[in-house]
Amino acid sequence: MIQPVVCEKKQIVLVGMSFYGDPFDSRAGWDDQNEIGHLWTRFMKFLSSHQSEIDAKSPPFYEVHIYTAETREIGKFEVFVGMEVDLTKIKMFPVELCLKVLPETQYAIFTFRGEEITTDWEKTLQDWLTTSGYASPYTYNFQYYDDCFKGLDRIGESVLDVYIPVVKIA
């Protein structure tokens, strides 16, 4: 089993775009033709034509999965893709984008390499939580895409970190 590194992170301010629903309705898994892939395409297209309006640090990019009661009942959740920003440096906030503020908290950081990235890592996170003495105080996790992620077409060469907020319970 993959063992995470646990560390404290400051508040993270992200600007980006969201999708709410079952992102795997049209295609399952790691596929650029499912709703998550379409969301990334829409966001990257927007960035390429509006870069001067947002003073963003990129990469890295973030993909945040936000869960609600509906997630267990009917499989719907929010997927947010975006990048970290310094709000004091944004000249204009485009109406097409939304803002997410991830709280300062402790995170368990799981590092997946190559084909591990396309496995059911959500199960890995949950399995670790049930035996680790930690609980997740929030209903989200995020994937951190920096230069180590080479793309879906080069998944074998890629590295991806997945963050889950945690608090010690034991």
Image: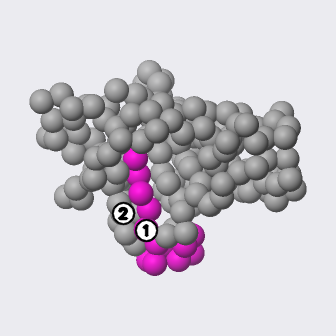
In terms of depth relative to the viewer, which is nearer, 22 or 10?
10
Q: Is residue 156 magenta?
A: yes
User: Horizontal placement of 107 versus 37: left or right?
Assistant: left
Mark 2 crowd level (few <14, some 14–19, many ≥20, 10 Å Cα): some
Asked whether, in this view, residue 123 is left or right of residue 100, the answer is left
Q: Is residue 64 above or below residue 155?
A: above
Eyeballing the image, is 56 above or below 135? Answer: below
Residues tagged 2 and 1 counted as in contact (Cβ below 8 A): yes
The numbered mark at residue 112 is 2
Q: Position of residue 45 (x, y in %)?
A: 80, 56
Q: Which mark is residue 159?
A: 1
Q: Is residue 143 magenta?
A: no
- Residue 119 lies, in percent from the top left, at 36, 60
Amino acid at pointer 2: Phe
Choose the circle earlier in sequence order: 2 or 1.
2
Say few, some or many: other residues with alpha carbon within 10 Å of mark 1 (under 14 / 14 to 19 / 20 or more): many
Q: Is residue 73 visible?
A: yes
Q: Nearer the viewer, residue 20 or 135?
A: 135
Compared to 74, does 51 lie above or below?
Answer: below
Residue in front for this viewpoint, 114 or 135: 135
* Magenta highlight range: 150-163
